[in-house]
Amino acid sequence: MKTAEETAERTAAHAVEKVAFIGLGHMGVPMARRLLAAGHPLTVWNRTAAKAGPLVAEGAVLAASPADAVRDADVLITMVAGPDALDAIAAEVAPALRSGARWIEMSTVGPDAVRALAIRLGSGVTLVDAPVLGSTDRAAEGELGILAGGDVAGVAHVLARLGTVTRSGPPGSGAALKLVANAAVIGGVGVVAEALRLARALGLDEDVARAALGRGPLGGAVARAFADGVHFGTGLAVKDAGLATKAARLPVTQAVLEGLRHAVAADPALAHADIAQAAARIVRTV
């Protein structure tokens, strides 16, 4: 016998919901494109409206404001820069959302921001926190890892267009698990950068040291530190590491955070570049 949740998901899977997508950065555009290609009527909004141009050319509707984007939406997806951006969006869209709508919050904002949003929304809107693992390449292919907290029934089929869902627990747990995952990534890239900095100081050939590290237990971190075609902006990494270090005492993450901050201070353009570029600067500052 099917559970009530399975029945709800099967019923919802036959519907084509109107989706509002807010936040068209490096990740938002390919994610929104996946939903548009799946046949969802899509309304989009972004602070910089020009970023919506390619999606509008493919059939999306550009809203004049966040509130206008969500008025007729069955599902709202947000993919914004951080807690402050989410709070500003919530102030505009919460009064405009219809009762029964579902809000999938996919940014990296931490569990406190998700819980505050749930309180703001009350019982009329179902909130799912579903931040993602993976970069722009996996977003384009619909192969993201999605960490979903809360009641996923009714939106699991929407999330399935974007990647594979891992149900993490109650509301806020997805946001919490994303901080854990990002702290590991940021810490790993930082440790690789520092190891290569040591190799440089000791006069070792950097390529030889990098290859040796890649064959060891840090192989995954080495691959991410030198990855091409992906994007995890250093400014966002600084934000995420800051959220993590506020939640617990994390000496290693704190040290990497300070290294990234120094790198951005020395070259502000790094804030918008992939974290690997900031790591390269740490390696070469001996």
Image (cartoon, rainbow, N blue to C red):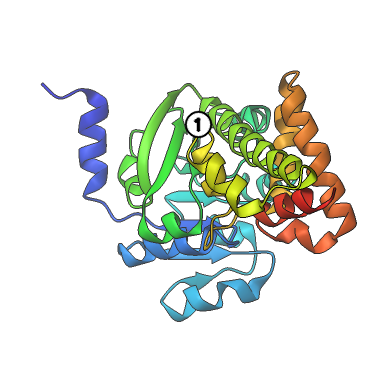
Q: Is residue 87 visible?
A: no
Please tell me which residue is depicted at 63% across the width and 76% down the height of the picture: 50
Counting the numbered discs, the total is 1
Q: Is residue 172 left or right of residue 251?
A: left
Residue that sits furthest to the top in the current view: 249
The reply, left or right, for residue 232 in relation to residue 75 is: right
Residue farthest to the front?
203
Residue at x 77% of width, y 54% of height: 281
Q: Label 1 belongs to which residue?
A: 217
**Furthest-left residue in view?**
1
Foreground residue, 218 or 252?
Answer: 218
Q: Position of residue 232 (x, y in %)?
A: 61, 52
**Closer-to-camera residue (192/248):** 192
For label 1, the crowd category at 10 Å Cα-Cα, with few meaning under 14, some 14 to 19 and many 20 or more, is: few
Per the image, label 1 sits on a secondary structure element best described as loop
Q: Is residue 248 above or below residue 94?
A: above
Q: Which residue is at the front of the view, 223 or 59?
A: 223
Q: Quadrant of residue 101?
A: top left
Task: Name the image quarter holding the N terminus.
Answer: top left
Q: Position of residue 13 (x, y in %)?
A: 24, 46
Amino acid type shown at disc 1: Pro
Is residue 229 among the parts visible in the rendering? yes
Image coords of residue 170 (percent x, y): 48, 21
In the rendered view, would you say 232 is above or below 181?
below
Residue at 75%, 40% in the rendered image: 198
